[in-house]
Amino acid sequence: MEMIESILLVDDESLFHLVFEDACSLLDISLSLECIDSSDNAARMFKGLYETGQQKPECVFVDLNIVGSSFDGIELVRKINYEYGNHVVVGIISSSNDREEQIKAQAAGAQFWLVKSDDIEPRLEEFRKDFSKYKDRTAPFKVYR
Amino acid sequence: MNLVTVNKQTRDLLISLYKERRVSLEGNIIKVLKAEVGDTEFEEYLKVTLQKDQETRKKRLDITKQIQTQNQELVQKQEEISRINQELNQSLEQTKAAMVQAEQAREAALNDLDLLQKRSQTELIGTIVKVALWVVVGVGIITTGLYATALIANVETTLIGNTWSNMFGILLTNSFSIIGTIMGVKYATEKKE
């Protein structure tokens, strides 16, 4: 199965960065993984990439509530989709499984919602299987729980 | 993905480092290296190194997950403590308010008791004074009756006349005093009610 070229994780919880990085490595999901701990920094990064025309990460996982940021994950997803030129697979990764938030995320352009838990590997594995469909925009919004 | 091959010098150095000092490559770099066709030794080296790296990652992942779970539990406990503290503070405030109310009720009860005692005392005084008034009136009537009888019977009235005069003077003085006391008691009772 093809690896994801590059992944960006936006999450304030640095311990989860390690979990995500190790899980992605063990599952051979991607060799290139970057973690950012605030939505402001992520927005700045995307703005810069959009303005300079540089390559964006192929897939972005955004935490729903990013502590210490001026806006939440759904707003970042909206910015990535509508302000910074899109062309990335973007979704929410959160310990919440709130249906209302999922509808908001979908409206903001999120393609998936991955529920965080101790057992994240099977969800990432399933996500990886669907990734090509997300890439060509043929997969419907899906919640990995 | 394009894999990278290393030159012989690097390959030999990597293998000897592993064999002699158990030092090996770590991380995703292992996944982008490949051995030359037929180089089974380097192929084996990459396989063992990757396995070792994955074991390390697996171990780290498990530990990180444990720490994450403990952190979440700590956060939950902290939230619980904070909630209990808030409840305790609310209870403390309620207790303080109840204490103030109880203190006010106690003061009101003491005032009522004081009033009741004073009223009872006043009523008792009133009764005594009324009885005294009736005694005074009774003594006056009896003395006057005796004096009148003596006058009608035409007997010696000097003694009874002086007695009546003194008695009446004393009775009048006392009755004014008694009436004054009754009025005072009545006024005090009406005011407190």
Image: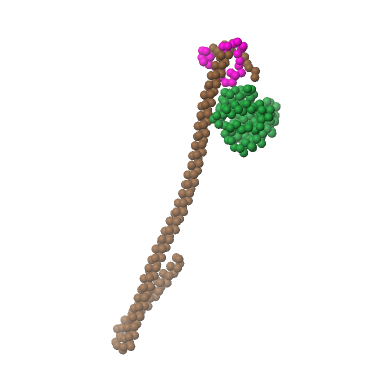
Chain colours: A green, B brown
What residue sits 50% from the left and 34% below the top? B73
Task: Determine whether, in the image, residue B90 is placed left or right of residue B173.
Answer: right
For residue A94, what is the image quadrant?
Answer: top right
Relative height, residue B169 to residue B94 (above, below): below
| Quarter of the rendering containing residue B132 | bottom left
Instruction: Report whether B86 appears left or right of B30.
Output: left
x and y, in percent, of residue A65 in the image: 59, 35
Residue that appears at 47% across and 44% down = B88
Q: Seen from this angle, which residue lies furthest bottom?
A: B154
Q: Where in the figure is residue B4, as x and y percent of width and height?
A: 63, 16
Can you say whether B155 is above or below A58 in the image?
Answer: below
Q: Is residue B6 above or below residue B71?
A: above
Question: Which quadrant of the figure has residue B142?
Answer: bottom left
Q: Is residue A114 magenta?
A: no
Which residue occupies 70% across, 31% down? A85
Quadrant location of the C terminus of chain A in the rendered image: top right
Q: Which residues are magenta?
A: B18-42
Q: Is residue A46 visible?
A: no
The mark tally for this picture is: 0
Q: Is residue B24 magenta?
A: yes
Q: Nearer the viewer, residue A110 or A84?
A: A110
Spot occupied by residue B37 in the image (x, y as percentages of width and height): 62, 11
Give the position of the N terminus of chain A as an image quadrant. Answer: top right
- Is residue B66 visible in this depiction of the protein? yes
Give the residue drawn at x 50%, y 32%. Answer: B70
- Is B47 rendered above or below residue B94? above
- Coordinates of residue B27 in the picture (x, y in percent): 57, 21
